[in-house]
Image (spheres, rainbow, N blue to C red):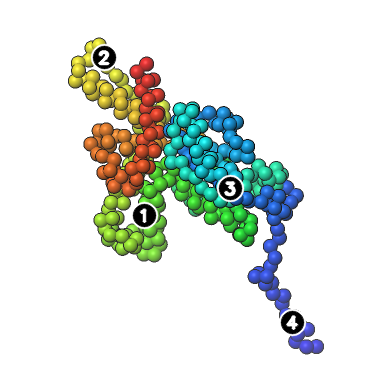
Amino acid sequence: MSDRTLFPTPTVTDNANRVRQPLVFGGLPEAEGWALAPITPRDRVHFRLDREMPLDEFRADLPDGVTVSYDQGEGLYRVDGACGSASVLADWIRAWCARYGCATVGLRAETDVRRRAPRDLPGDFLADLCRHYGPVSLKRLQRNMSTIRLHLPDPDDLGQQVFEWILKAVSQYDETKGVPFGAFLATQLSKWVHDLGRNAHGRTAADTEHKQQKAIAAFLAEHQRRPSEKELAAYMGQSVATLRRNSQTVATLNGLRNLQSLDGGPDAAEILLPDSCEAPDEIMGEAEQTLLSHALTAACAPDPGARPDQRAGQPNVLGWATWYLTTWGGATKTQLSADLNTSVRNMNVYADRVEQAMKTRLAELVD
């Protein structure tokens, strides 16, 4: 009897050649489901408004074949139409808004945007896909949980946000590129978690904070200690002066985040205003400033009725800084733009939100 008979060659499994079984959602293989609602090109117009508009009336007046979606978290409207219609749609939107007393902010027309509507997929397919990728997404987001808890402290809100992100990925996923949906979703989740901070505190400032935190974490992993100012500047490829300026931006944001007066909770200090018939002029001057300051803080506080992931559910810290530092701090918007490392246009967007809320708040306080 040969040695080969006594000691047979073990079977070797070649993982590289292992065929991954296709996922099945709602009784359909994944590829067949995507084929039923393929991603298609369209023209899209993005815009925000200086005040709320009657969305149902806007939707009813839209031309045939044109659809609108509204992202409450970003306060962004998206109008989709046929290819080649972007400029016509943009003019139509401006005219419609003018009739209803609204003004568009940052209107931008984009051509050849590839998207699908999740509702066009079979219902069972979409429901099963969400049930499968919901837990997978939560596991993927564990590494970002410290960032997420700043904006979504309630687990129920996080679960809701995850399903909204899955639907957003479904609308953007291009199956023709050969990338599995799970891999595409994981990449997008990393971006959208970062966008939570960008939407709450301003894109440029949030990016600055993210880059610094990432560089510090990498230096810690490599050297087992925090970097000095000079080491961090060299690690990030910046001058010490640039690093100090950016660090001031990050410190300003962190200070504004921690303002207890923006919580709007039951423990917030109550401000008592003197009777105008009895208070001397100098006291009334202070009272008027107190009244305005109180209205400003209330206008920037989160709306208790909004979800934390919505724009109204976040403290408007950039709007607060713009109003407070230009009204009482003696700074100009140009100076603040340099100090906070953001554009004047971005500051104006957040300050306009404060103005609308302050008008309502001041009327309530006076009454």
Q: Mark 4 points at which residue?
A: 7
Would you call the spot at circle 1 few (<14 residues within 10 Å), some (14-19), or many (20 or more)?
some
Residue 83's tag is 3
Q: Earlier in the sequence, mark 2 or mark 1?
A: 1
Task: Indicate which disc, 2 or 3, sits on the residue closer to the N terminus.
Answer: 3
Q: Is mark 4 on a helix, strand or loop?
A: loop
Task: Looking at the picture, tell me which residue is in the foreground, 86 or 133.
Answer: 86
Q: Which amino acid does label 2 sit on?
A: Ser
Q: On the image, numbered disc 1 is attached to which residue?
A: 212
Which sits in the foreground, 95 or 107? 95
Q: How far apart are marks 3 and 1 (CA)?
A: 41 Å
Give the SS element for disc 2.
loop
Q: How far apart are marks 2 and 1 (CA)?
A: 50 Å
> Helix or strand or loop: what does disc 1 sit on?
helix
Q: Which of marks 4 and 2 is nearer the N terminus?
A: 4
Q: From the image, tell me which residue sits under label 2.
A: 276
Are the residues tagged 4 and 3 within 8 Å (C-beta)? no
